[in-house]
Image (cartoon, grey):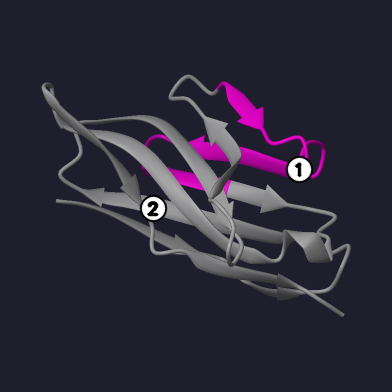
């Protein structure tokens, strides 16, 4: 079994910052890509940022220059530093990771979601 536990969401004023964390635990052989997604009510889940095991990153156009994704491979943890937050960033953020529990078994796993609210 694999678990992803997120933390770091909350309420922040426009222009403020938050840092999300997502720690993977359980039966882990290898973690490849890790990423953050968000989903507003009534909308499809969208990619925010992704990072490969080698450290290559990609971002949604809406967050480029404001958000930074990073990971600690030793701790099986991915982070999302969010700066210059806007009200339109308000939604639930989900962590995702592609994890192999053995050399021949892998899957895509999701965290429980963490609410980010940007409001004055």
Question: Where is residue 47 drawn, in percent x and y?
Answer: 58, 41
Residue 59 picture quarter: top right
Q: Would you call the spot at circle 1 few (<14 residues within 10 Å), some (14-19), or many (20 or more)?
A: some
Q: Which of the two discs, 1 and 2, sits closer to the camera?
A: 1
SS type, badge 1: loop
Question: Where is residue 2 drawn, in percent x and y?
Answer: 21, 50
In the image: residue 3, left or right of residue 53: left
Q: Are marks 1 and 2 in contact (CB under 8 Å)?
A: no
Above or below — where is 104 with respect to 71? above
SS type, badge 2: strand
In the image: residue 98, left or right of residue 64: left
The quarter of the rendered structure image containing the C terminus is bottom right
Image disc number at residue 96? none
Q: Is residue 76 magenta?
A: yes
Above or below — where is 93 with respect to 9? above
- Residue indicated by mark 2: 23
Please give the name of the residue rendered at 27% of the width and 35% of the height, measured from the top-left corner.
99
In the image: residue 112, left or right of residue 116: left
**Cα distance in 3D space between marks 1 and 2:** 22 Å
- Residue indicated by mark 1: 63
Please give the name of the residue rendered at 69% of the width and 40% of the height, measured from the top-left corner.
68
First to last magenta residue range: 56-79
Q: Is residue 34 magenta?
A: no
């Amino acid at each position: 079994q694999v678990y992803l536990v997120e933390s770091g969401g909350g309420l922040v004023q426009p222009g403020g910052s938050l840092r999300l964390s997502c720690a993977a635990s359980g039966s882990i052989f290898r973690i490849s890509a890790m990423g953050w997604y968000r989903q507003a009510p009534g909308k499809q889940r969208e990619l925010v940022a992704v990072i490969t095991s080698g450290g290559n990153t990609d971002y949604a156009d809406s967050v480029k220059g404001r958000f930074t994704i990073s990971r600690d491979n030793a701790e099986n943890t991915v982070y999302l530093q969010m700066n210059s937050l806007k009200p339109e960033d308000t939604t639930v953020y989900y962590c995702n990771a592609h994890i192999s529990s053995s050399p021949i078994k892998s899957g895509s796993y999701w965290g429980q979601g963490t609410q980010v609210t940007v409001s004055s």
